[in-house]
Image (cartoon, coloured by chain):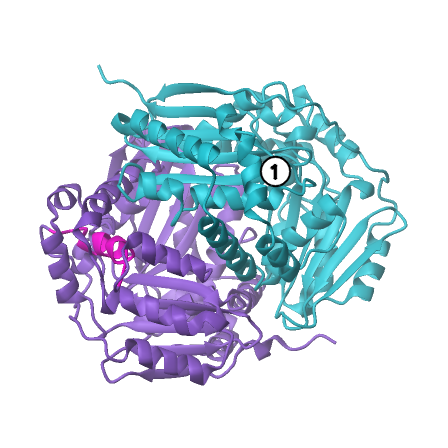
């Protein structure tokens, strides 16, 4: 990809702006990354970051409750938002001529009105989302596994909140959270594709004038991993769903590529230790492992799905796979395959501005630099097998937390 | 400084090899990657009676080794080249796909062609393939939206299109390696196959590779029965859970019919995005559901509209009422602003969907199936631009009143008292 350029700037109010300019792109994608998520909530605020994400679509001083979405649509935008443990992202992509209007709209959304009526209607929507999640056994298994694995750390809580916590969240508490967290020093604007950098900075400076400044920061309580095997039986489930969590490494840790490659060699969906042990023989229909690098720590995540009668056997086989790699390591060829397939995946995602957006922004937030597709591919390809073996030598899967959701026993 | 997005469309190569394989090559010379899709007209719709699920078994089995290589060796040579591969089967089509660096094209084409030209279909893999298919079928039960989707199609179609792409349990259980191999010989071949390659590199060389790899392929021919639908009716499927899934299904016009673009715009008004009517009426104003949507689905020779929502039992009656009302209310026409928003969205989405090589290859393959030819992006853009408000509203006014088939899935059937708004 030729002609790529990285842009970086900070407005007088502390708002950071970065961009990866691509002259061949047919679109412009942009996002506000707010450094706020589930882990920044207090005990009586569970679910507020995600609730607030919804409410940012429900109107501003300039726009009524139906006008935010309508204006996105009028720009022909593809757009959405997501909330994670540590980030709330609002993003959209348009054809280049609509870029200034999209920027204005996203900027306006960061100052939502949070009117009582809108909060009440949207509360029902979030309660429906929680109900939908309750019918997804894999989500239930992961929520429960997190409660145990991250016991004592705010990241243990379910992002959506619970029926009780959302039911009790009044508009005043949402407003207070917004006031505390949505400050210019705790946000990053990211652009990707065919944008106009100078015009963007000028527009942002004007439109964010008077925003509350400062960086809300974040607490970093120690993470104490709690291992164990847990299970529950549920009436709305017909099969066994297994969530697995194990200690990994954080985003600023140089071992993060090794952790990602390790996860791929052990648990990629088409050619990996778990695939050949569980999927190929038809013991399980899902058996995957990945690595999530978070702010200050990280974790391996794994998911297994099978019929109820086979769950013990599947867990035994998975344990043997983990024990095998921890004891004997990986072969050089497996490592090289993980490197190449991960590199291709990265290159494919980089084909569109939208595919670059959060990656470029997160790299900047986490490591304060631009990481092009080419540079990350180089880093992956030059990560030695020995780095993976060193991680395995710490025997992370001995400290795994496993949570099984399985069908209720029939009488 | 900003260039026109129209440059996204480069000349497309569209040719049919003497053995019948339709080859499309879409150059995207700025990309280092190539995405390839081989689409075959093989799916559950032309599975034999008593062998429903054989296309699903075949799709998985074909990916487990090819040529001289067993499953592990085959996966390894492709991984060594960094290939991201995939395979999938639907009611009407099976597709084998791969994405890779353009410089490796010569090697990758050969290996992929081996999947259909020199399939391995080893006995040692069959038991695992069948067991996995049974798992995949059973897993639908733990996903209410997917289960509703299957039930809706089953209620709507009278023809074999009602079958699940995952197959039927009893048929999967009695499937044999010989039986599934016979299905390969009968149905998998160059006739009706579409090979689409989108991405970087030289188009002429890509075409040469396609000819060299697939030109000598011989095999069977699949035929698909014409679709038939049932009269509108209601069906409830019992399922424990926190939510009720609601689905509505009704006939629509297809991409080669008069009114296709009018319908596209009308559907954009109904459910283009979060500012559209369904989202506004169901979610934004009433808070009835988190998930709600509408789409036009295609099988060859028939198009239909699907409208869906998931909601808790107390809100299900009102949600269903609003969905039906919104389907019908389209007949009263759309406003100038709604029309403008929908057209801009459809055009803008079209450009953005075509930025990625894989999505572009998928769209072109679908075009061949449903339109009979790949539509240039400019043709779609111009057509959308050319359908003004009056044409949309005239078409909507003349459209028959919707009478959808309604399927609900949840802990209890919606009764009359639920329907009081």
* The one of B287 and A357 positioned closer to us in this rendering: A357
Residue B218: image location, x then y, percent: 19, 75
Q: Which image quarter is the C terminus of chain B in?
A: top left
Q: Is residue A86 above or below residue B349?
A: above
Label 1: few (<14), some (14–19) or many (≥20) C-alpha neighbours in 10 Å? some
Residue A223: in sight, yes or no? yes
Q: Residue at x 80, y 50 (%)?
A: A16
* The one of A22 and B316 positioned closer to us in this rendering: A22
Q: Is residue B397 above or below residue A299?
A: below
Q: Residue at x 30, y 40 (%)?
A: B140
Q: Which image quarter is the N terminus of chain B in?
A: bottom right
Residue B53: image location, x then y, percent: 19, 51
Q: Is residue A317 above or below residue B11?
A: above
Q: Which chain is purple?
A: B
What's the magenta region?
A: B51-66
Q: Is residue A256 left or right of residue B169?
A: right
Residue B9: image location, x then y, percent: 52, 78
Q: Please tell me the colour of chain A.
A: cyan
Mark 1: secondary structure: loop
A216 magenta-colored? no
Q: Residue at x 26, y 41 (%)?
A: A281
Residue B3: image location, x then y, percent: 67, 77
Q: Mark 1 belongs to which subunit? A: A
Q: Is residue A9 left or right of residue B321?
A: right
| Tally of numbered tags | 1
Q: Locate residue B4: give its quadrant.
A: bottom right
Residue B167: in sight, yes or no? no
* The one of A356 and A253 positioned closer to us in this rendering: A253
* Label 1 sits on residue: A84
Q: Is residue A124 above or below residue B109?
A: above
Q: Is residue A214 left or right of residue B184?
A: right
């Amino acid at each position: 990809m030729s002609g790529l350029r990285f842009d970086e700037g900070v407005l007088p109010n502390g708002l950071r702006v970065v961009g990866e300019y691509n002259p061949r792109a047919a679109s412009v994608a942009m996002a506000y990354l707010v450094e706020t998520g589930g882990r920044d909530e207090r005990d009586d605020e569970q679910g507020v970051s995600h609730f607030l994400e919804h409410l940012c679509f429900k109107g501003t001083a300039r726009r009524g409750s139906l006008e935010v979405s309508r204006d996105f649509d009028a720009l022909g935008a593809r757009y959405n938002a997501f909330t994670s443990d540590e980030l709330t992202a609002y993003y959209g992509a348009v054809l280049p001529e609509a870029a200034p209007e999209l920027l204005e709209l996203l900027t306006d959304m960061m100052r939502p009105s949070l009117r009582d009526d809108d909060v009440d209607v949207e509360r029902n929507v979030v309660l429906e989302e929680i109900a939908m999640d309750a019918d997804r056994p894999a989500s239930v298994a992961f929520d429960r596994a997190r409660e145990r694995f991250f016991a004592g750390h705010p990241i243990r809580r379910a992002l959506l909140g619970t029926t009780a916590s959302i039911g009790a969240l009044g508009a005043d508490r949402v407003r207070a959270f917004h006031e505390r967290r949505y400050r210019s020093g705790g946000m990053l604007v990211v652009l990707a594709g065919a944008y106009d950098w100078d015009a963007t900075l000028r527009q942002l400076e004007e439109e964010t004038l008077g925003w509350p400044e400062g960086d809300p920061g974040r607490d970093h309580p120690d993470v104490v991993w709690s291992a164990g095997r847990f299970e529950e039986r549920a009436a709305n489930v017909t099969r066994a769903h297994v969530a697995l969590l194990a200690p990994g490494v954080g985003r600023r840790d140089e071992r993060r590529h090794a952790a990602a490659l390790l996860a791929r060699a052990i648990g990629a969906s088409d050619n990996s230790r778990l695939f050949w042990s569980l999927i190929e023989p038809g013991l399980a229909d899902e058996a995957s492992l990945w690595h999530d690098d978070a702010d200050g720590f990280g974790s391996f995540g794994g998911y297994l799905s099978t019929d109820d009668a086979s769950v013990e056997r599947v867990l035994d086989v998975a344990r043997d796979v983990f024990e095998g790699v921890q004891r004997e390591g990986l072969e050089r060829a497996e490592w090289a395959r993980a490197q190449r397939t991960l590199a291709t995946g990265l290159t494919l995602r980089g084909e569109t501005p939208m595919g670059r957006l959060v990656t470029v922004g997160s790299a900047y937030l986490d490591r304060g630099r631009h990481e092009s597709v080419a540079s990350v591919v180089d880093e992956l390809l030059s990560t030695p097998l020995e780095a993976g073996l060193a991680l395995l030598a710490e025997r992370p899967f001995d400290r795994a937390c496993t949570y099984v959701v399985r069908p209720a026993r029939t009488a | 400084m900003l260039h026109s997005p129209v440059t996204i469309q480069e000349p497309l190569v569209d040719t049919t090899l003497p053995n019948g394989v339709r080859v499309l090559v879409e150059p995207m010379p700025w990309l280092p990657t190539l995405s390839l899709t081989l689409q075959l007209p093989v799916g559950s719709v032309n599975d034999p009676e008593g062998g429903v699920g054989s296309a699903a078994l075949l799709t998985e089995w074909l990916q487990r080794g090819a040529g001289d290589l067993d499953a592990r060796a085959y996966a390894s040579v492709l991984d060594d080249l960094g290939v991201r591969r995939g395979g999938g089967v639907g009611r009407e089509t099976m597709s084998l796909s791969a994405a890779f660096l353009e410089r490796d094209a010569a090697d990758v084409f050969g290996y992929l062609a081996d999947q259909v030209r020199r399939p391995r279909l080893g006995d040692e893999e069959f038991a695992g393939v069948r067991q996995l298919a049974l798992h995949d079928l059973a897993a639908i039960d733990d996903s209410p939206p997917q289960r509703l989707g299957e039930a809706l199609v089953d209620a709507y179609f009278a023809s074999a299109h009602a079958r699940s792409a995952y197959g039927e349990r009893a048929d999967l259980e009695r499937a044999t390696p010989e039986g599934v191999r016979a299905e390969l010989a009968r149905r998998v071949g160059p006739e009706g196959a579409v090979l689409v390659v989108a991405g970087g590199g030289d188009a002429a060389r890509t075409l040469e590779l396609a000819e060299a790899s697939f030109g000598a392929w011989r095999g069977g021919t699949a035929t698909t029965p014409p679709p038939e639908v049932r009269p509108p009716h209601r069906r409830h499927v019992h399922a424990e859970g926190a939510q009720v899934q609601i689905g509505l299904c009704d006939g629509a016009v297809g991409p080669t019919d008069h009114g296709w673009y009018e319908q596209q715009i009308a559907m954009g008004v109904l459910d283009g995005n979060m500012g559209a009517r369904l989202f506004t009426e169901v979610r934004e104003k009433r808070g009835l559901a988190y998930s709600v949507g509408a789409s036009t689905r295609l099988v060859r020779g028939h198009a239909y509209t699907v409208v869906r929502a998931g909601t808790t039992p107390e809100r299900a009656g009102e949600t269903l009422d609003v969905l039906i009302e919104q389907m019908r209310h389209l007949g009263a026409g759309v406003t100038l602003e709604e029309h403008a928003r929908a057209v801009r969205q459809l055009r803008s989405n079209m450009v953005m969907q075509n930025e990625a090589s894989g999505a572009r290859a998928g769209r072109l393959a679908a075009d061949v199936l449903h339109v009979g030819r790949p539509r240039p992006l400019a043709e779609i853009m111009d057509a959308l631009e050319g359908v003004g408000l009056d044409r949309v509203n005239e078409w909507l006014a003349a459209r028959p009143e919707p009478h959808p088939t309604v399927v609900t899935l949840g802990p209890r059937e919606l009764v009359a008292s639920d329907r009081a708004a």
